[in-house]
Amino acid sequence: MDVRTAYNAWSEQYDTNANRTRDLEATVLREVLNALPFARVLEIGCGTGKNTEWLAQRSKHITAVDLSEGMLARAREKVALPHVRFVQADILQPWTFRDGAYDLVTFSLVLEHVEHLGPVLKEGAMSLATGGHLYVGELHPFKQYAGTKARFETEAGTQVVTCYDHHTSDFLNSAMANGLELVHLGEHFHDDDKTGPPWVLSLLLRKS
């Protein structure tokens, strides 16, 4: 199912479905960014606002972007703050939604839906002020290799969202090609159970 249609359909149940990837990535974002100061944030793939609420407590301005009108409607209900601006946009098109340079750009569980990382990470890097940071939180490649994809249940059956596999080197090479340097790489497990593959990959990159 194409990404926009899928997330519009998923939006009504996204916050209430059991979703270990969603919940772990929210925890990871908070852990990775907790000690990082930032005033202006560009949040790509804000969804229903699961991370927007936390980012809003720590910043002075957020541009929160999502492809799905349904997800944005939920986010606006939860985060009705004057310093948060929600925008419906396709990040595969030119980023006309930017309103200045940002201290932080975040991608949460969105790049798995992007076939070619380079152009999107280029836009992300262009959105940063010098010294700014870019965060990526994604389903770990090891889970992708095993066939895990974003999916949800409906009365018509399981709906699988269009996804693309990316290797860790794909993220890093695309980031470095666009002037970003690696600050942190994390592999995260549920309940610290390291007997299986990591579930979420996190990257923190800096624009020098």
Image (tube, grey):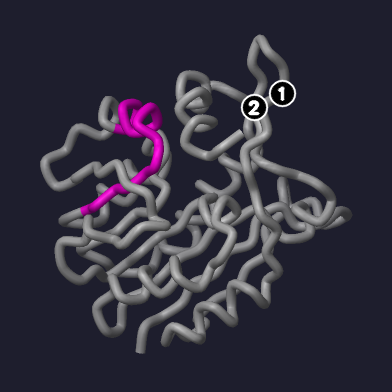
Tell me if residue 116 comes above or below residue 122 in the rendering: above
**Residue 8, position as x, y percentages in the image:** 45, 27
**Residue 158, position as x, y percentages in the image:** 71, 23
Looking at the image, the residue that sits furthest to the top is 155
Tell me if residue 86 comes above or below residue 103 in the rendering: above
The residue that appears at 73% across and 60% down in the rendered structure is: 141
**Quick one: label 2, few (<14), some, or many (20+) residues within 10 Å?**
some
Q: Amino acid at mark 2?
A: Phe
Q: Is residue 196 left or right of residue 7?
A: right
Query: Please, what secondary structure does the residue beneath circle 1 have?
Result: strand
Residue that label 2 marks = 152
Residue 144 marker? none
Q: Is residue 51 left or right of residue 175?
A: left
Instruction: Point out the image quarter for the N terminus.
Output: top right
> Which region shows up in magenta?
62-75
Residue that label 1 marks = 158
Query: Please, what secondary structure does the residue beneath circle 2 have?
Result: strand
State the image quarter where residue 160 is shown. top right
State the image quarter where residue 117 is shown. bottom right
The residue that appears at 21% across and 61% down in the rendered structure is: 98
**Quick one: label 1, few (<14), some, or many (20+) residues within 10 Å?**
few
Q: Is residue 67 magenta?
A: yes
Of pointers 1 and 2, the one earlier in the residue sequence? 2
Q: Is residue 37 magenta?
A: no
**Residue 126, position as x, y percentages in the image:** 31, 75
Instruction: Point out the image quarter for the C terminus.
Output: bottom left
Front in this rendered view, residue 47 or 120: 120
Q: Amino acid at mark 1?
A: Thr
Tell me if residue 72 comes above or below residue 113 in the rendering: above
Marks 1 and 2 close (CB-CB < 8 Å): yes
